[in-house]
Image: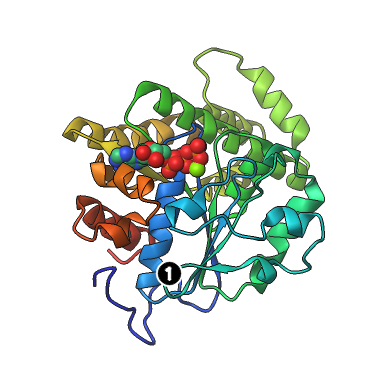
Amino acid sequence: MSIFNKKESGSHMSGNDGKQKIWAIGGGKGGVGKSLVTANISICLALMGYKVVTIDLDLGGANLHTCLGVPVPDKTLSDYLTKKVRSLKDLLTPTAIPNLHIISGAQDDVGIANLKHMQKAKILGRLVELDADFVLLDLGAGTTFNTLDFFISADQGILIALPEPTSIENTYRFIKSVYHRKLKMIEELLEIGPIIDRAMNAKISQNSTPADLIRNIIGINPQVGYRLKNEISKLTCKLIINQARTQSDIDIGFSMKIICKKYFGINLDYVGYLDYDATVWQSVKRRKPLLMEFPNSPLVTNFDRMVHRLLNLN
Ligand SMILES: Nc1ncnc2c1ncn2[C@@H]1O[C@H](COP(=O)(O)OP(=O)(O)OP(=O)(O)O)[C@@H](O)[C@H]1O
Ligand SMILES: [Mg+2]
């Protein structure tokens, strides 16, 4: 089934089991294509017949609306956070694509780094009120706690990387930050701080990896260690390589998957790549959504394959 066909009624697709799914799109570096990917995955899902709300959480640098061909929305998340509107529903702006609404990020300098814990919890807790099969979050660049927490809270965390050393390094840094944040949460939950400290002290070597840390904890206390390993293994990130020009660019995703497993012991699911293509900046210049403006772009096939993979349809 192509993205331009509607989903079958009564389909057994994951994502259509009655529970809203949250997909967060992030990546350490700015300008790698997070908004482009968020916008066009949202379009794919909407064209398949799912109800989609896409939220620009790049507070301060919001531009997801441009990738969707929508003018700056009147109401933004700032209005919600400052209580000018009462419900997230009041922020929904329709797009030209049926089933697809956008909630825009703040246009002022309310950075996501400045979101208070309560504000973050308020947004996350209220997403269920939205009438949507999928809620997509465009996270913006960086590794602030708030960005990491939105990423970790999502049902799927999707990372975008370019096939260049700086972007790859930033992606690992992002994964490392997610890993540490998650470890901290489990540590508090299981009250195993002292064991982690002991394991850290047991092997202080430059070659020791986060995966070694878990092995050390298993040595100290197998029960706690295996629980920790189990929790960490739930931390599956999806990876997309953007702006691929050669086969070796495409293959970088597979190498990153292997390194991630070896170093962190976590599964990086490489869901696909996007070709470097002029239709992207042409659509941005025209302020039109790529998939609608260029239905014959090679990226249509890329997105089609990727979304099927994300929906577990392959
Ligand atoms: N596959 C591609 N082919 C060609 N150009 C691309 C591709 N992907 C992204 N670009 C270019 O990169 C620019 C940045 O993309 P985008 O705004 O989606 O990045 P971002 O990660 O959201 O950036 P920020 O961190 O600033 O929010 C696009 O406007 C486009 O010009
Ligand atoms: Mg962006």
Answer few, some or many: residues within 10 Å of disc 1's Cα (few below 14, many 20 plus, some between 14 and 19). few
For residue 183, above or below residue 78:
above
161 on left or right of 52: left
> x, y percentage for residue 184?
70, 38
Image quadrant for the N terminus? bottom left
Q: Residue at x 42, y 28 (%)?
A: 167
Residue placed under numbered mark 1 in the picture: 96
Residue 266 seen from this side: no
Q: Hey, which quadrant is residue 60 in on the image?
A: top right
Residue 167 seen from this side: yes
Quarter of the render that holds ligand 1? top left
- Label 1 residue SS: loop
Q: Residue at x 64, y 45 (%)?
A: 59
Front residue of 70 and 27: 70
14 on left or right of 82: left
Image quadrant for the C terminus? bottom left
Q: Residue at x 33, y 50 (%)?
A: 283
Q: Residue at x 82, y 60 (%)?
A: 83
Question: What's under tag 1, amino acid-wise?
Answer: Ala
> x, y percentage for residue 179?
58, 37
> x, y percentage for residue 188?
77, 42
For residue 208, above or below residue 108:
above
